[in-house]
Amino acid sequence: MPVWDVFGKRKPDDEFQWVGGIKAPDVDMALVLARETHFRHKEGVAYAVRRRGDTDAALHVGKYGGDELGGLTDRSYRRQEAYAGVGARQKRVSREFARAGVRIDRSRPPAAGSPRARVPDA
């Protein structure tokens, strides 16, 4: 099965930039897979594919325009780097509970194989 390079534009003024590659039997399937794989979060305005190795061939531009892909919609919350760390959330929750006068018991039960987890003989 041939490998296709996928190119995309994040803004209307940008040049097409390489965003990845996919395997597909023909150009129509490559366009569908490119859209679903690399642009399903609506982070671009246009996309195109070209068979890997055909550097002189023209790009096959996707049928869906900027409106279909979502345009310049900010979807950064869908990426891992957009999430706050667990520590920051734990501090915030601890402060809220302290203001409310609620004590948080942070003790953990002993691990299954530890000596403290064993039941004493009767």
Image: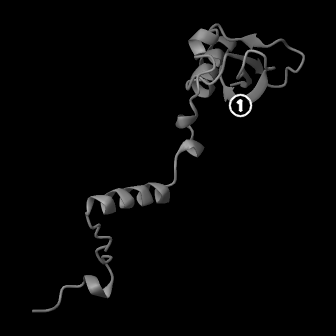
In the picture, measured across the screen, residue 4 lies left or right of residue 39, that is right
> Of residues 99 and 10, which is closer to you in this image?
99
Q: Secondary structure at mark 1?
A: strand
Q: Residues within 10 Å of mark 1 (few under 14, many from 20)?
A: some
| Residue 50 occupies quadrant | top right
As rendered, which of 5 and 98 lies closer to the eye?
98
Q: How is the image coloured?
A: one colour
Q: Is residue 26 left or right of residue 121?
A: right
Up-down: is 85 above or below 35? below
What x and y, as percent, mark residue 32?
Answer: 60, 16
Q: Residue furthest bottom?
A: 122
12 and 31: which is toward the camera = 12
Residue 9 falls in image quadrant: top right
Between 28 and 91, the one lying in front of the other is: 91
> Is 96 located above or below residue 15 in the figure?
below
In the current view of this chain or complex, which residue is farthest to the right?
Answer: 56
> x, y percentage for residue 107?
31, 74
* Residue in the image at 67% along x and 28% along y: 22
Q: Quadrant of residue 23?
A: top right
For the point 67% across and 15% down, the residue is: 26
Q: Is 106 on the left-hand or right-hand side of 5?
A: left
In the rendered image, the quadrant that contains the N terminus is top right
Q: Amino acid at mark 1?
A: Gly
- Dot 1 corresponds to which residue? 20
The number of numbered discs placed on residues in the rendered structure image is: 1
Single out the residue that lies furthest toward the front. 99
In the rendered image, which quarter contains the C terminus? bottom left
Q: Position of residue 4 (x, y in %)?
A: 73, 24
The x, y position of residue 52, in whole percent, is 79, 25
Q: Which residue is found at the position 63% from the left and 20% from the top?
A: 72
Q: Is the residue 65 above or below the residue 122 in the image? A: above
